[in-house]
Amino acid sequence: MRATEYRSSGIWRSSGPIGDLRQWRVETPDAIAIRAHRSGGPQRQISYGEYAGHVERFAGALVELGVRPGEVVALQLPNWWQAGALMLAAARVGAVLTLIPPNIRSRELERVLAGTDASLCVTADEWTGFDHAAAVREMAPRLPQLRTRVVLGRPAGGDEIGFTSFFEDTPWERRHPVALEDAQEDPDRVAVVCFTSGTSGEPKGILHTWNTLHATVAQLVEIDGGGPGEALFTPITIVHLFGVVYSVLTPLLTGACSVLLDAWSGETGLAVLAESGATQFTATPLHFFDLVAAAGTGALALPALRVLFAAGTTIPKQLVTEVRDALGVPLRAEYGMTEIGLGTSTRADDPVDWAAHSDGRPGSATEIDVRSNTVVTPDQPGRLFVRGPGVCLASVGRDSGKVTVIADHDDGWFDTGDLAAPDGRGGIRLAGRVGDRIGGSAMIPVTDVESLLLSHPGVTDVALVGYPDGKGGELACAVIRPATTPPVGLEELRVYLSDQRMTDFYLPSRLELLPQLPRNTIGKVRKELLRRWLRGEADLTDA
């Protein structure tokens, strides 16, 4: 019934991204579709006419390699322009995309390729010191369904196919019927599989259609507008759901330009913001901390920039002020996850610092429900459920193979596993994950404690994690990356929190120091790993 509602409202369509690309090739063929900044090389600009031509050529190459509708094509690439064109080429031939971030290593990569029955894998040669091509080559004999391995970068060896010569230089579109005008899109079938990072359990494959992804894009455009002449920049990996949404589908829907950067630093990010004339920038709080540090004192001149979104995890309060001072644009909050796409966001009509107090309200097509057996308050948040057209079709356990169809449970309500409370303006404030809950009958507000700890000059990064108290309950451990030498001590942190009038029960009773906190692709701390580490059940190299 809701599918009919989503279609009648127009948030689910009868076409997909190929139709969008076809539109702009006709209407604005010379407009810049992609500005790709690659480390060690010049910027590459690609027009919409050229973009469409690359998609047809890449689609022809896939057909030449035997890829047929319903087969799985795996991509593990940095933020290179070829990644987006490959996604659209796979859409053109009706293949299913499995997207694998570049930081995933051999053990997990093999499980994903085996679990999805990928017939073709495109990977970089070497990236950030890891030889991806060699890793796939080593595991290939154990993956009988993997017919084809394609390497983008150095010349391929053995039975590997070199991407540049085969995909870019050979006009396969003349041999195969892959013209965009001939595309017969079915936006309701499974098109993209993204894997969660297992921050609180077994990694899962999340199954999306082009329509569930379009629902997120349509709501983003509804909230902030956009169109030809806009430039959208995100450093989030393009082979993640957020990367697909911001670097591929949103620009494609609106005829805007996608700005890509493959190797992040705060200094490089600032340079690209200025050089590209970016109008919207979406990143994790970690990226914004890097920008603030690189900017130094005083606001920068970025006249084109109008929207800043921090996504992926709750924003530390002090970052909201620091970003506005450094970049001259208010920072806004956005909450989403691989399973639901966009959940909530703060808006232009909210108070200027509202991202310090709220994670926003949902778009017009999305419903939220905060459930609890008691009255929901900031100190006692409820469990957050989401329902809407952007929620995935199903999830599949990477290791167990267990399939969960979302519409078959709780009338389509998806249990996010997050805790939240109302923000007083029709939205929510997140309070952490259910699995991050610390306490018993009373719960420690993890997000608030972490935010306040981050304001201490001796703390660069922090995660508050529960550990057994030996009496059947839990206490709080502050796991920090120290900012000073010698490092800050536990008692100093407790006094600091008390001086800020924080409840004694909330104060950490244990302190652990790490040079880096383990994080997933979009910046979320892997607290499930930290909990096991504190119990002596894992080391921090565990995946």
Image: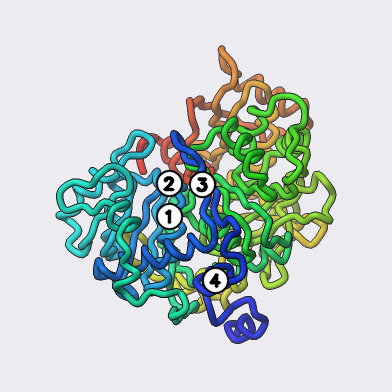
What residue is disc 2 on? 78
Q: Amino acid at mark 1?
A: Ala
Residue marked by disc 4: 212
Residue at figure coordinates x 74%, y 28% from the top left: 498
Comes first in the chain, label 1 or label 4? 1
Residue 62 % position (x, y): 31, 66
Residue 172 location (% of width, % of height): 31, 67
Please state which of the two labelled residues, at mark 3 or mark 1, is closer to the viewer.
3
* Residue bearing mark 3: 36
- Helix, strand or loop at label 2? It is loop
CA gap between label 3 and label 2 equals 11 Å
Q: Residue at x 56, y 23 (%)?
A: 482
Q: Residue furthest top?
A: 486
Dots 1, 2 in contact, CB < 8 A? yes
Left or right position of 524 against 314? left
The quadrant holding residue 425 is bottom right
Q: Residue at x 60, y 55 (%)?
A: 257
Badge 2 or badge 4: first in the primary sequence: 2
Q: Earlier in the sequence, mark 1 or mark 2?
A: 2
Give the residue type at disc 2. Pro
| Nearer the camera: disc 3 or disc 2 | 3
C-alpha span from label 3 to label 1: 11 Å
Label disc, if present, on residue 537 of the rendered structure:
none
Is residue 116 shown left or right of residue 56? left
Whichever of callouts 4 and 3 sits on the residue coming sooner in the sequence is 3
Numbered disc 3: secondary structure = strand
CA separation in Å, label 1 and label 2: 8 Å
The residue singled out by tag 1 in the image is: 83
